[in-house]
Each structure stands twice: as structure tokens, then as C-alpha cells.
Image: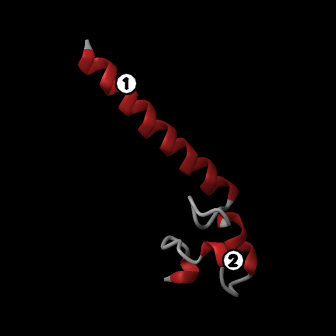
Amino acid sequence: MVNLIVFLIIAAIVGGAGLYIYKAKKRGVKCIGCPSGAACGKQGGHGCASSCASCSGCSHHS
């Protein structure tokens, strides 16, 4: 019974994270998890916002 509860909790966490990523990508967010992730794509390729400098997933930092 305990194993089932642990499995359901882990499944809920993974499912919630997947849903968050899906929704963020659908909105066009470039740096998921970055506070200025939505602003990165709106910069027109001129670099990310300064608060996004630590985001390794942003295409402007690669």
C-alpha cells in the first residue's frame, strides 16, 4: 500500500512538471524556469534579459 502511495505521488509530480513544460512551450517561452523566459524570445535575437543570464536552456546563451 505504501509503495502505491509513493508511486502516485511521484507520478503526480512528474505529470505536473510535464504539463507545466507543455503549457510553457505552447505559450512560446524560450527559457522554461527562467524568470524572464518569455522575454528572451521577444528580444529579437539581441540577447536575453539580464535576469536570464544564468539560464543554460536559452538559445541566446548557447
Residue 38 lies in quadrant = bottom right
Q: Is residue 24 above or below residue 42?
A: above
Give me the disc on residue 8. 1
Q: Determine the residue positioned at 31% across, 25% down.
A: 6
Location of residue 33 in the rendering, given as x and y in whole percent from the top left corner: 56, 58
For mark 2, what is the residue? 49
Q: CA distance from mark 2 to mark 1?
A: 38 Å
Colour style of the rendered protein structure: secondary structure
**Amino acid identity at mark 1:** Leu
Is 7 left or right of 61, judged from the image as shown? left
Is 24 left or right of 61, judged from the image as shown? right
Location of residue 13 in the rendering, given as x and y in whole percent from the top left corner: 44, 36
Q: Which residue, as the protein is rendered here, is positioned at the far bottom?
A: 46
Give the secondary structure at mark 1. Answer: helix
Residue sitting nearer the eye, 39 or 19? 39
Give the secondary structure at mark 2. Answer: loop
Location of residue 28 in the rendering, given as x and y in whole percent from the top left corner: 67, 61
Q: Determine the residue positioned at 54% across, 51% down.
A: 21
Q: Which residue, as the protein is rendered here, is positioned at the far top?
A: 1
Q: Is residue 15 above or below residue 38?
A: above
Mark 1 closeness class: few <14, some 14–19, many ≥20 residues within 10 Å: few
Give me the disc on residue 21. none
Mark 2 closeness class: few <14, some 14–19, many ≥20 residues within 10 Å: some
Badge nearest the viewer, 2 or 1: 2
Q: Which of pointers 2 and 1 lies earlier in the amino acid sequence?
A: 1
Q: Determine the residue positioned at 65% across, 73% down.
A: 51
